[in-house]
Every structure is written in C-alpha cells, then in structure tokens.
Amino acid sequence: MTRGLVANFRELDATCDAIEDLKARKIEKFTVYTPTPRHEIEHALKPPISRVRQFTLIGGLCGAVFGYWISIWTSDYWALVVGGKAVASWIPYTIICFELMVLIGGLSTVYGMFILSRVPKITQTVGFDPRFTATDYGIFVEAPPERLKEVEALLRDHGALEVRNER
Amino acid sequence: MAVSAQPLRPNVASANVQLPGVEDYGQVDREISATLNPSKGWFAALGVAILLFLWGAGTWMYQIYWGLGNAGYNPPVMWGVYIITFVFWVGIGHAGTLISAILFLFRAGFRTTIYRCAEAMTVFAVMTAGLFPIIHIGRPWKFFWLIPYPNWRLIWPNFKSPLVWDVFAISTYLTISTTFLYVGLIPDIATLRDRCTNPVRKRFLAVLSLGWRNSEPEWRHFARMYLFLAAFSTPLVLSVHSVVSFDFAMAINPGWHTTIFPPYFVAGAIYSGIGMVFTIIIPIRKFFKLEHYVTINHLDAAAKLALFTSLVVGCAYLVEFWVAWYSGNAFEKDYFMNRVFGQWWWSAWIMLTCNMIFPLSLFSQRLRRNPTWLFILSILINIGMWYERFVIIVPTLAHEFEPWQWSGYLPSWVDTSILIGSFGWFFMWFLLFIRNLPVIAIAEVKEVVPPRLRSHARGTDIDSSGHHRDYGTETPGEFD
C-alpha cells in the first residue's frame, strides 16, 4: 500500500528548495505537481529526456514506408497503363508518403505521450489534490513509516501550506 | 551627442507581449472559466447559427433529390461555389495551425492567448471544407470511392490524381488538427474538472481529461509531444494548401497551369485565416471582457502578420500578371485581360481591393491597435479571399482555349443557400465549443503569469507580494 505525504506549496521557489532538499536526503521517490510547466522545477529535478521522440521516429518511418508501399502496390495491382509513362511513379507518391508520415508519426507521438505519462488514469485520488490543477504546487512523497516525520518537517520547513498523510 | 528620437508609441516586440492585467493563477482560472457560463447573447447567436445551418442542410437535401442541375453550373463552368467554398474554408483553417504550431516553434509570445481560438477555428473550418467536395460530387453516398480500401471489384484509386492527394491531405490535416486541439485541451479540462461542482459534468470532464493530474512526468512528456506535433504540423499546413493548389496547377488551363500556385495558395490561406481569427477573437474578447488577456499588443502583432501575408499575396497577384505578359502565351494574356478588364472585372477588383488595398492601412500603428477597424478589415479580408477563389476558378473555366466554349456563371439560390448554411454550421460548432471548453489556454497563460515567489530578488519586475509590477502608463496601448 502506498504511504506518503502530500504537501501543497504556494510559492515556486519554496517547491524547488523542497525538491532539492529531498534529493539531498536521498529521498528519491516523490512526484511533483505544478499548475503549469516551469523550468525551475525541471532544473531542480533534472529528469531524463522524454522518450516520446522514439515513438515519433518509428511512427513517422512506418507511415512513410506504408505511403510508398500502398501507392506502388495498388499501381501494380490495378495498372493504369499510359504509353511512355511509368506505371508506378515515385514523385506523386511522395505526397502520399509525406501525408501518411505526418498522420502516423503524429498519432504515434500522442500515443507515446499517453504510454509514458500513464494516461488515461482510472483513479487519480492517491497522492493528488485538486488544487494542483489550479493554483498550488505540490509534492507527493512516498516514504517508509519511520521517515514520515522527518519528511513532514522538511516540507513544512520549506513553506508547505498544508501537509497531509496519504493512506 | 546623437540623440535617438523616441517614437510616441513604441512598438512592442511580438515575442515579448505580457499580461500585466493578470496577477495570479487563481485569476486566470476564474476569469477564463467564466466564459463557460451561457448568456442570452450566446443563445441568440447559437439560434441564428442553427437556423442558417438548417437552411443550408435543407437546401442540400433538395439538391440531392432534384440533382446538381439546380446548383447554377453552366457548362463548361462545372466547378463553382462548392469548390470555391471548399478552398475558402481549407484556407481559413490554415491560420489556426500557423498560430498554434509555427508560431509555437518560433516562440512568438503573442500566440498564447489566441491560439486556442485559432485551433478550434481550424478544426471546424476543415470539417466544413470537407463537406463541400462531398456536396459537389452530387452523389454524396459514393464519396468513399476515393479512399483506398479492399473491395469486391478489386479497384483502387489512382494515386497520380490530385483529387486523391486532396483526400489524403485534408483527412490527415483534420485528424492532426483535431488531435492537436484535444491534447492541448487535456490540462485545461483537468482544471475545469477540479473546479466543477456538478457531479454529472465533473464525471464527463474526468473522462475527457483522461485522469490528468499536472504531475511533472506528465508535463515533461506533454511538452515533448507538443513540440513534435508542432514540428509535424508545420510542414503539414504548408503541404495541405499546396496540394489543394495542385487541383488547379496540374491542369493545362490558362490561369491555372502555373508553378506559383503552391506558395501563392499557402500565403493566401494564412492571410484569410488571420482575417477569420480577428472576426472571432475581437467579439470574444469584448463580450467575455477578456481585453486584459487578448491585449492590444497581441492584436497589433497579429495585424503585422496579416499585413505581411497580404503583401505576399499582393506580390503573387502582380507576379501572375507579369508571368502572363512575359510568357508571350496568347491564351494566358487574353485570360488575364478578361479577368481584370473584361468579363470578370468586378470580381477581380473586389479581390484586389480587399486583399491588396485595404490591408495597407495596417502600416498605420493607430489602425493596427484599433479593434473596431481590425474587425471591419477582417470582414473585408474574408470577402476578398472568397472572391480570390472565385476569380481563380470561374474565369478560367468560362474562358478556355476555344471561343465557342466561352460562357458565364451565376450561382443559383441552391448553392448560395448551402454557402450561407456552411457559415451556420461553422459558427454552430464554434459557439458550442466556447460554451463547453476554455477559449483561452489556461495552462499556457499561467506560463506567462509570473509565479509567486518566497524570495523576490530574482527579478526587478516582481514586487514584494510576488506579483508582476504594473507596467505604468508609458507601456504602449495595453489598455487602450
């Protein structure tokens, strides 16, 4: 069962300071919430680069290959023979290739974001406060019971408006 | 010592536009979500839009029953209002992607408060555009023949045809634009979900928001996804109207068979779309009292974009005339003389006046910062751009190589009604959108609003309470 503390912050720099302090104390298992993306939080967390781009690359390549394949295959299968002209002509088929690259590449990018962000989420109550989508920054710290007091003190010291136990 | 003269109203760089009237995140949530409350004006506008739509839909049913002969076609002018309006609405859609994707990549700050409106406009405009080729083919139940699918006759579409390219371009554009709009809305829907007190609506918003929680990993992947989607949308938007222009440029008819068409169509599309953005955003900022979000500086920056694209379009018109003269092609020369000084002079001069002459007023900073003038100009741009497509399509078909083919064209009440109905359809969706979802991007506006800080030594523009300092009266035009 998840055990932890949810802290609400009103100030951005207080949130960043709390993050850095948590990392300094080797408490690594926490989730940060922010009403809007902020570089300050990113700098404090130093997260790895998102892997969404891998989905983009693979989706885009698949779309491009499929675009050329479907147009060349159909030209050969149902040939419209015009004297002196190629049955399958790659120049106009580049348009189909491009459109399908964008279509499948774009959709797989969104799919990648969903997979990596783990959305859709069925439940959103654990370690979350509705104020995180409005005005407040938040940190949900998962810690063993013996460290909860230490974590609570840390969060309050850094200016958390509210700290509550989760589960 | 040289003293540089200070302009009376200095230009504000479009990348640096700020929102001094917005103090904190709570204000953003409160004021933008207030647009979701319906008013009598909203109901009245929706009623008018639905009536127009029903009139157009009823007329389409009449046309299906009695046939395309009622649509004003006059051989050889067999492309008329429907194809003109198709190109018009596809063009309108382009500004949305320009503002949401291209200006995002260029980090143009003024896009922040207008891009949601422009994106929704794109989706509804492309939805509207997509109807017109289906209406135009006369037997709408057979439109799916254009889609490559395994069928019992073993027939496949001809991928060398520009009409098949159109199907791929428009359907890709509609899918990607809708996806772009929806994923951009997810964090804002989560905000609405957590503010909502009505349990049914809250459940509905919870499903739409996919359980979004504003966590850092979500934002990290979201930002990367948004960047790549913008990077895909940028060449897509340029390709779509290029492909639409191929419908004409691949033919050998005078006036159509020209290599300038793709960039000319793209510039025109963006220009017409910005016109429609003004038509929509200026009433919205006034009726919802959002002048401190969509500020005069934002409108000024967008007006500069309209001016630039109008100059590109004007240049393309002049280059067309020059190419006709320089080519020495008698058919081409005769066509352009007929277009500007002959049979179609009235439509050509509506186009030239609305798209080349009136927008020159935007060289005046005073007029760029006047919402009333921008709204009037946007209507003129919409009219001018519809006539641009009329001038491209009809005079060519009515004046081909053989004089015995020459004819005229006048839309009938059927195609005119369907044209009017398309505006009802478009505005019906748009009005339903602004009633149900935020018309300004909440999360992105919060990025512009300075965050509350415990220590205030990080910037001189943040006061001791963590709020942005007032800009003062010397800031040009923020509250004009």
Image: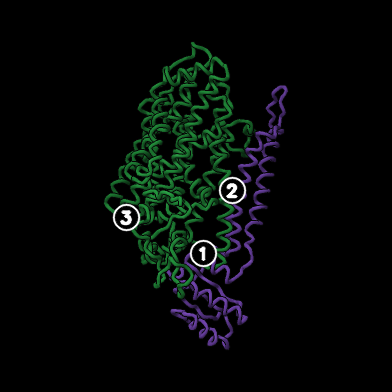
Chain colours: A purple, B green
Residue drawn at (58%, 82%), measured in percent from left and top?
A143
- Where residue B149 appears, as percent x and y from the top left, is 61, 39
Chain label for disc 2: B
Residue A46 lies in what quarter of the image? bottom right
Given residues B199 and A29, the one toward you in this image is A29
Where does label 3 land, which residue?
B289
Q: Secondary structure at mark 1?
A: loop
**Precedes in sequence: disc 2 or disc 3:** 2
Residue B352 lies in what quarter of the image? top left
Q: CA distance from mark 1 to mark 2?
A: 22 Å
Report the disc number at residue B232: 2
Report the disc number at residue B434: none
- Where residue B456 appears, as percent x and y from the top left, is 45, 72
Q: On the rendered structure, is A60 left or right of B404? A: right
Given residues B285 and A31, the one toward you in this image is B285
Callout 3 environment at 10 Å: few (<14), some (14 to 19), or many (20+)? some
Q: Nearer the viewer, mark 2 or mark 3?
A: 3
Q: Secondary structure at mark 2?
A: helix
Where does label 1 land, which residue?
A37
Residue drawn at (49%, 14%), measured in percent from left and top?
B405
* Amino acid on which the number 1 mark rests in the picture: Pro
Residue drawn at (63%, 39%), measured in percent from left and top?
A96
